[in-house]
């Protein structure tokens, strides 16, 4: 992709030109117009974030309108091959929707031009941005994956440092994509949160975690470790979340202490809501953990307003503390802070023995990271527990 700049009055393309590329406006304003019976019909004024000229590219036909800069413009050029490749790979339903939209747009344009109306009132071209199209596609795939049970539970061990044993596991979702292999949640959780798909995904993960606890119990692993599940803010808004969790645990005869809940620090917005969920968890005996501590904006107010059992210190701290004295001082201070509010400290992202030695020296209770173990399927965990 390359960038184009335009001066005011300069044409980007003219009616009848071949459809070489589409453009994303990064800065400035572009007027789309068409010539009919000597009259200049303004179709739309497009600006930042709008796509220009994608219609002709999508259906491979000559330009049916002209595009002229109204102000100095910077545009990102998306070549035809790139766009058609994306569309070619897109979900068939999404593609059909796009083609339907396009047909309707062309019919409306023809009717308007026939009547010679609209010259004073720009109409929308209906051009959503490309990222929206890509997102719609990914969401459709994710929805299918959920239905086909291609989502998978991985468990990452958490070490009780002083006791020298695995206290529990964090539940992490994986998407076993038929072509791409395992896809990290970093790629799809944010999208799932935007679209509410996180709610059924969360239910699925809860079921998987409870099934894993049952499997550990049947394998004779004792005492039963805990499994900590990630709960997104969107899930917190669902009524009955904790009640459902309790019911499923009770149906499977799993003690509630074996299920923990992680709430991400960086995304916490609604104190009242989090406070309410935490209170209900506490009443029921479920531990709640503050995740990714140190990455958000107002984390100190979270600490005193909400009563967390455990604070999980973000992996960026252990990553820098071995080479940077200030990072080390900060880690020391954060651990003291966590202890001062009578919570347990857990540090994630521990990859080396040296990092673990530091945690031991600082009196940190729990460690999690590749040194202790990578996220693994339940079968591997049970096999390891049998050997150990
Ligand atoms: P998180 O909760 O902070 O999870 C820790 C992430 O760090 C995991 O990435 C884990 O695989 C990775 N990690 C653990 N130890 C190490 C290490 O020693 N070094 C390095 N470099 N990385 C390490 P993952 O599995 O890709 O998950 C990414 C994020 O996706 C999670 O961050 C969590 O926010 C979200 N997520 C994962 N599963 C779920 C889920 O079931 N529900 C919800 N709502 N969110 C989930
Ligand atoms: Ca987590
Ligand atoms: Ca984390």
Image (tube, grey):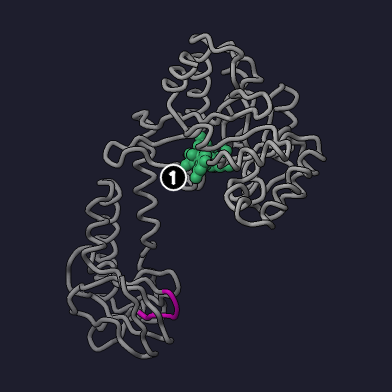
Q: Is residue 29 left or right of residue 94?
A: right
Q: In which quarter of the image is residue 69?
A: bottom left
Find numbered disc 1 in the image and state the secondary structure of the residue it sits on: helix
Q: Residue at x 35, y 54 (%)?
A: 134
Q: Which residue is drawn at 26% across and 62% down?
A: 83
The segment highlighted magenta reads 26-31
Q: On screen, 168 above or below 120?
A: above
Residue 24 visible, this orientation: yes
Horizontal and vertical percent for residue 186? 46, 46
Q: Which residue is drawn at 51% across and 15% down?
A: 216
Q: On screen, 35 above or below 93?
A: below
* In-front residue for pair 44/111: 44
Q: Residue at x 18, y 73 (%)?
A: 62
Crowding near the residue tagged with mark 1, few <14, some 14–19, many ≥20 C-alpha atoms within 10 Å: some
Horizontal and vertical percent for residue 339? 78, 38
Q: Quadrant of residue 32?
A: bottom left
Q: On screen, 125 above or below 279?
A: below
Q: In this view, does 46 lie to the left or right of 212?
A: left
Check if residue 28 falls in the magenta segment: yes
Horizontal and vertical percent for residue 317? 62, 49
Check if residue 108 falls in the magenta segment: no
Question: Label 1, on which residue?
Answer: 188
Q: Quadrant of the N terminus?
A: bottom left
Residue 201 visible, this orientation: no
* In-front residue for pair 146/59: 146
- The mark total stands at 1
Direction right: furthest residue: 340
* In-front residue for pair 388/64: 388
Disc 1 C-beta below 8 A from ligand 1: no
Q: In which quarter of the image is residue 366?
A: top right
* In-front residue for pair 320/137: 320
Horizontal and vertical percent for residue 85? 23, 57
């Amino acid at each position: 992709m390359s960038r184009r700049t335009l001066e005011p009055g300069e044409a980007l393309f003219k009616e009848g030109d071949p459809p070489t590329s589409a453009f994303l406006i990064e800065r400035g304003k572009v007027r789309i117009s068409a010539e009919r019976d000597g009259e200049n019909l303004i179709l739309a004024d497009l600006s930042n974030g709008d796509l220009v000229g994608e219609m002709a590219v999508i259906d491979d036909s000559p330009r049916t309108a002209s595009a002229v800069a109204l102000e100095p413009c910077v545009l990102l050029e998306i070549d035809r091959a790139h766009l058609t490749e994306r569309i070619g790979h897109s979900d068939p339903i999404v593609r059909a929707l796009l083609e339907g939209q396009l047909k309707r747009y062309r019919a409306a344009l023809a009717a308007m031009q026939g009547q010679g109306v609209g010259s004073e009132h720009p109409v929308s071209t209906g051009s959503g941005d490309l990222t929206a199209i890509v997102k719609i596609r990914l969401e459709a795939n994710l929805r299918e994956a959920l239905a086909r049970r291609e989502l998978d539970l991985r468990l990452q061990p958490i070490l009780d440092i002083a006791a020298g044993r695995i206290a529990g596991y964090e539940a992490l979702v994986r998407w076993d994509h038929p072509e791409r292999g395992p896809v990290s949640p970093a790629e799809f959780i944010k999208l799932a949160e935007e679209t509410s798909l996180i709610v059924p995904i969360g239910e699925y993960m809860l079921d998987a975690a409870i099934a894993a606890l049952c499997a550990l119990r049947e394998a004779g692993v004792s005492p039963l470790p805990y499994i900590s599940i990630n709960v997104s803010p969107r899930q917190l808004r669902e009524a009955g979340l904790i009640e459902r969790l309790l019911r499923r645990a009770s149906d499977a005869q799993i003690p509630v202490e074996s299920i923990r809940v992680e709430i991400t620090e960086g995304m916490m917005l609604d104190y009242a809501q989090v406070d309410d969920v935490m209170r209900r968890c506490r009443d029921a005996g479920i531990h709640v953990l503050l995740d990714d501590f140190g990455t958000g904006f107002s984390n100190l107010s979270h600490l005193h307003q909400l009563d967390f059992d455990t604070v999980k210190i973000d992996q960026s701290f252990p990553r820098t503390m071995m080479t940077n004295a200030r990072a080390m001082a900060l880690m020391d201070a954060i651990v003291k802070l966590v202890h001062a509010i009578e919570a347990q400290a857990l540090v994630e992202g521990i990859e080396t023995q040296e990092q673990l030695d530091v945690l031991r020296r600082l009196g940190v209770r729990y460690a999690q990271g590749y040194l202790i173990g990578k996220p693994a399927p339940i079968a591997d965990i049970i096999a390891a527990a049998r050997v150990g």
